[in-house]
Image: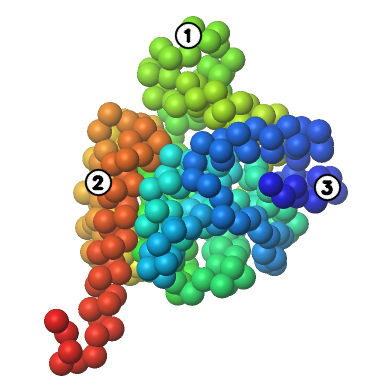
Amino acid sequence: MTVSPSTTRSRADVGRYVNDTLRDRYFAACDAVYALGAPLREEFDVETGYGTTHVYRYGPADPAAARRTPVVLVHGSGSCSAMWYPNTPALSAERTVYAIDTPGDAGRSVHREPLHRPEDAARWLDETLAAIGLDRVHLVGSSYGGWLVLNQAHRAPGRLASVTPLDPGGLEKVGLRFFVWIFISLFATSAPRALRPMLAKWLEQPVLIVPELRTMIRAGVRAFRIRRPAPLPLSEDELRTIRTPLYLVLGKRSLLLHPKRQVERVPRVIPGARAEIVSATGHGPQIDHADLVNERMLAFMDSVDRADDQRNVPSGRAG
């Protein structure tokens, strides 16, 4: 895989690697996780006003599938596009898939200008999609990436066919219980091997039992200093502006938000939105129940495309 330019050391307000040795060790760990997912068709860089965005492309063998509206994946905080390894095989069998590394977070993107405001995040993502050449996409985001896709649907929805936030930030103020879970989960990565399955079940944390994922997360914490916008909750007035078809997926035991509250609230506030709680999971439904979530995401995207096709059929020719 392509290696990013040398570590940025001169700016304290942009995400940066501690040193090149730790960066390269992290990249090697990421590559081991990428190998668990779909075969990569291509990777490349695009330029934006905030730096260089690194992009991974996965694609279907069927030319007809390749012509469908593509999927763009936005990862969670403290990670990179490798986290989508349980999802890229199924999604890319049906559509072209682009996974993008967020500047300010660990990955192969190079962060050069601050991304401190929600409007900056929306501008960066719109510039990235434009630079890739994508006019219409199904946008999927997990956790912090879920906040990014909600923010995009509110501020810059022009390129969006749909948005799918997976147990996202941006719906509630992040409570202490989530940060405690993150801290304990990171601490548990150092637990003896024999204890990790028990801790993984208790914490609902697959990082502990997927060796490649555990190595990647530990290497990223050591190597990278995160700098990106805080995922401030969208107000109800802001959520009401969203007109993009939306499918919200929540983990039943999520510690980031209150699933029962949001599964009622979001469809009430956002016209036409769908919301669903996945049982037997916490903050990672797309990892813990990848087959189920992949199937339902693809079904949602298909329904959006069919509705678009119906709207585009000339009068008198439908059916």
Q: Quadrant of residue 107?
A: top right
Q: Residues within 10 Å of mark 3 (few under 14, many from 20)?
A: few
Give the residue number, with chain letter if any, for mark 1: 195
Q: Are marks 1 and 3 in contact (CB under 8 Å)?
A: no
Query: Of the residues shown, which amino acid type is indicated by label 3?
Result: Ser
Mark 1 and mark 2 lie on one chain; the one further toward the N terminus is: 1
Rendered residue at 68%/52% (across/down): 109
Up/down of 197 relative to 278, above or below: above
Query: Of the residues shown, which amino acid type is indicated by label 2?
Result: Glu
Mark 3 and mark 2 lie on one chain; the one further toward the N terminus is: 3
Decide which of 271, 203 is in the foreground and name it.
203
Q: Quadrant of residue 130?
A: bottom right
Q: Position of residue 33 (x, y in %)?
A: 56, 35
Give the residue number, with chain letter if any, for mark 3: 6
Q: Position of residue 88 (x, y in %)?
A: 45, 47
Rendered residue at 24%/72% (across/down): 307
**In this orientation, does residue 305 appear?**
yes
Question: Could you say whether the residue bearing mark 1 is in a helix, strand or loop?
Answer: helix
Question: Could you say whether the residue bearing mark 2 is in a helix, strand or loop?
Answer: strand
Mark 1 → mark 2, Cα distance in angstroms: 32 Å
Q: Nearer the viewer, mark 1 or mark 2?
A: 1
The numbered mark at residue 276 is 2
